[in-house]
Image (cartoon, rainbow, N blue to C red):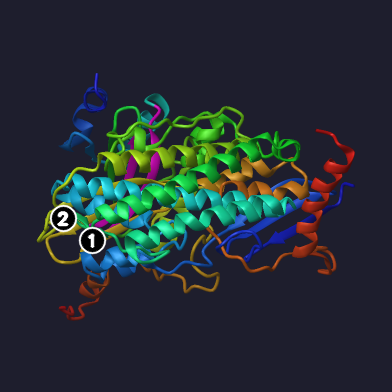
Amino acid sequence: MGKQHIIPIGPFHPLLEEPEFFKFYVEGEKVVDADVRIGYNHRGIEKLAEAKTWEQDIFLVERICGICSTSHPFAFVQAAEDVSDIEVPERAKYIRTIIGELERVHSHLLWVGLAGHFIGYNTVFMWAWKYREPVLDMFEIISGNRNHYAMFKVGGVRRDITEDQSSQLLKVLDEAEKFTKMITKAVLDDPVLHARLKGIGVLKKQDAIDLCVVGPTARPSGVAIDVRKDHPYAAYDRVPWEMIVMEEGDVFAKAAVRLLETIESVKIIRGCLKDMPKGPIDAEVREVGVGEGIGHHEAPRGEVFHYVRANGTNYPERHKIRAPSYMNVPSFKKTVIGESLADAALITASVDPCYCCTERMAVVDPDSDRVLMTGEDLIKLSQKKTEELRSRKCF
Amino acid sequence: MSIVEQIKDKFKDKVDVFVKSKRRVYVTTASREDGKEVVRYLFKELGIRMAIASGLDTRPGVEILYHMTADRDNMIVTVKVLVKKPELKMLTFTDFMPAANWIEREIHELLGVDFIGHPNLETLLLPDDWEAGVFPLRKKSFESEKEGIEREYR
């Protein structure tokens, strides 16, 4: 002991979707310091948005993220509408809410599956991804696509949900709800997961406030913030639902918050389909106007924030985009130090940062630069710990 | 007392408060010191979290906008500070608000604003071999005006 090793993880990480570079300083099994470097996926979208029209920008921001592809257009159209206080028709508000919530369901199920896989519990992975399928089918019914729905426009939505589609949706929703409830109950009662996830990677409430973390990284630490409740927009204040807050701040609480939120989302979608008023879906906006606008939306990972400044032309003068992971990822420095290496990768994954599924990580001896351990070994290490817990029956 | 009244009461003529709507408030401050005090007051005493800061290249300097999301009051308070050209020196907010760490690094590399007292102003987004003195988010038109090059019209 006493000798420090540096473990570089990334820029490509086996669990997550986008490249990011973590450097863990370890003594034996313990992580003593950590560092992060982002920017491998920097595409200059803010600058690009200044050279495109308001209409084109909606499609541009939709392509920022492949998983939560609706959250950026959702925030962006609200920012553009905020410039000259454009009022959106009621029906469009409900359709926006349905799309936003369907996305939360599929995104949270995706994360639970990946987390299960990473700790060597592949049953959770298979289940979560199987039951995510009907949700993607629902997207296909509404928009004709499983991803990148192109539903949003300034002043409303592009496509309506017909009576026929609505009844089909309700049928699929029943099925999806049954499975979501089942998997939530199974995961939250599972003794292996309790033993493996409880008490690791704790983010304290004060740290969460200081780092201004958002969404399902803040709520498990007892910070009760949710854009949908605090800044009601779309139809979120018209249907009944609860905000899920927990106090522990560990990885288990993060998983529990996501799963319980999924059930709330199903409730919101059902309420919206039931109460949806008839009427136009588009305010037919001709121009955005002059001034400043801010729009924010509670994406699956937290608050997405867009700021635009309009100068009266067809192009935004400035378009600032802030994704939730930008605030959430720095929190790993508080959560990972003092934990063992087998848990480090899971903790960094617990904030559900957006990154990419390729694999390139290795344990290097800093004196000789010799590769001691590959990425596969690290996953095995994590999976072995679960096996050990299982065989010792210490839960 | 509402947030707007509290700000007006505490800072009086140091700030210019513009209430755009019930949910959006813009506070323009005269100097960077005042800007820091306003943000400190909002963050530490009123418990309003920072959503993000935006940097914006304008003719007289770089405008930095601190977007503070007041969750209890359903309001976003944006504090504006103008960092004048050509020095472009701003005070760091990381000493009381760790959340400002990354965004200050980002504004430093994309717009060339120097944050006095920041613990680590290394590159965050751009490649390590990026040319020094090239700031991608600066407006090209202002640069060419300075050099006397004729402006390209679209």
Q: Is residue B54 magenta?
A: yes
In this view of the protein, which residue sits in the foreground, A218 or B128?
A: A218
Q: Quadrant of the N terminus of chain B?
A: top left
Range shown magenta: B47-70
Q: Are marks 2 and 1 in contact (CB under 8 Å)?
A: yes
**Quick check: A13 left or right of A290?**
right
Which labelled disc corresponds to residue B67? none
> Looking at the rendered structure, which numbered label has been put on residue A282?
2
Q: Label 1: chain?
A: A
- Of all chains, the one bearing label 2 is A
Residue A148 in the image: above or below residue A275: below
Q: Is residue A54 left or right of residue A116?
A: left
Q: Is residue A213 visible?
A: no
Up the image or down, B33 lies above or below A112; here it is: above
The residue labelled by disc 1 is: A158
Residue type at the position of mark 1: Arg
Q: Position of residue A3 (x, y in %)?
A: 86, 51
- Give the Cα distance between marks 2 and 1: 8 Å
Residue at image location 48% in from the left, 35% down from the top: B96
Mark 1 falls on what kind of element?
A: loop
What's the amino acid at mark 2? Asp
Q: What residue lies at 49% left-to-right and 63% top-to-bottom?
A: B125
Q: Is residue A287 magenta?
A: no
* Element on which disc 2 rests: loop
Is the stretch drawn in magenta largely helix, strand or loop?
strand
Structural crowding at the residue carrying mark 1, measured as other residues with C-alpha within 10 Å and reported as few (<14), some (14–19) or many (≥20): some
Q: Name the quadrant of the C terminus of chain B.
A: bottom left
Placement of A307 over or under A259, stated as above or below: below
